[in-house]
Amino acid sequence: PLERGAVASPGSHYQAGLICNNGTALCHIATGADALRIQNVGENWSEWRSFEDESEWDIIPARGVLVQYHAEGSSSYIVGDCIDAAGESCHPSWHESMFIRGDWNSWGAWEGSRMRL
């Protein structure tokens, strides 16, 4: 059988269509996974649960959703997806905030250097 998804492609961290059913659920493609946990970026991870094809989840528009899968004795399979309020795809960041330094902000001296979701 053809293996697909996060476990078959561990270097791919974006999974278009992970957020499904008009933004009300997560549709998992992770052949071989036996457990999963979910996180809206910036919030805590859910408890580990048995793998399921679809999970109900409270999607926050324009905030990435990450899913970590456990398979083959490893939990290093993580993918994300993001949709905005209009249902359009957006970039699923792994970080709630980032700090940027450069000539333009005196190498971090400017308070506005931090970007937040």
Image: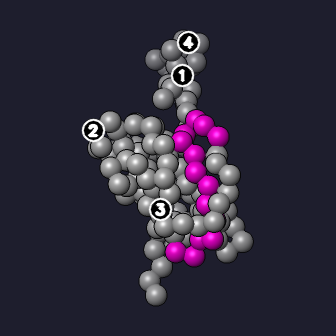
Question: Mark 3 or mark 2, which has the lower sequence index?
Answer: 3
Q: Position of residue 48 (x, y in %)?
A: 67, 57
Q: Which residue is mark 1?
A: 114
- Tag 2 secondary structure: loop
Residue at 40% across, 48% down? 24
Q: Residues within 10 Å of mark 1 (few under 14, many from 20)?
A: few
Residue 111, numbered circle: 4
Q: Which residue is mark 2?
A: 86
Mark 3 residue type: Glu
Give yes or no for contact between labels 1 and 4 (Cβ–Cβ under 8 Å). Answer: yes
Q: Which residue is mark 3?
A: 54
Q: Residue furthest top?
A: 110
Q: Residue furthest right?
A: 73
Residue 52 quadrant: bottom right
- Tag 3 secondary structure: strand
Q: Nearer the viewer, mark 3 or mark 4?
A: 3
Residue 115 covered by magenta stretch: no
Q: Position of residue 5 (x, y in %)?
A: 47, 69
Question: Mark 2 or mark 4, which has the lower sequence index?
Answer: 2
Q: Nearer the viewer, residue 67 or 54?
A: 54
- Tag 4 secondary structure: helix
Q: Is residue 84 visible?
A: yes
Give the Cα distance between marks 1 and 4: 7 Å
Give the Cα distance between marks 2 and 4: 32 Å
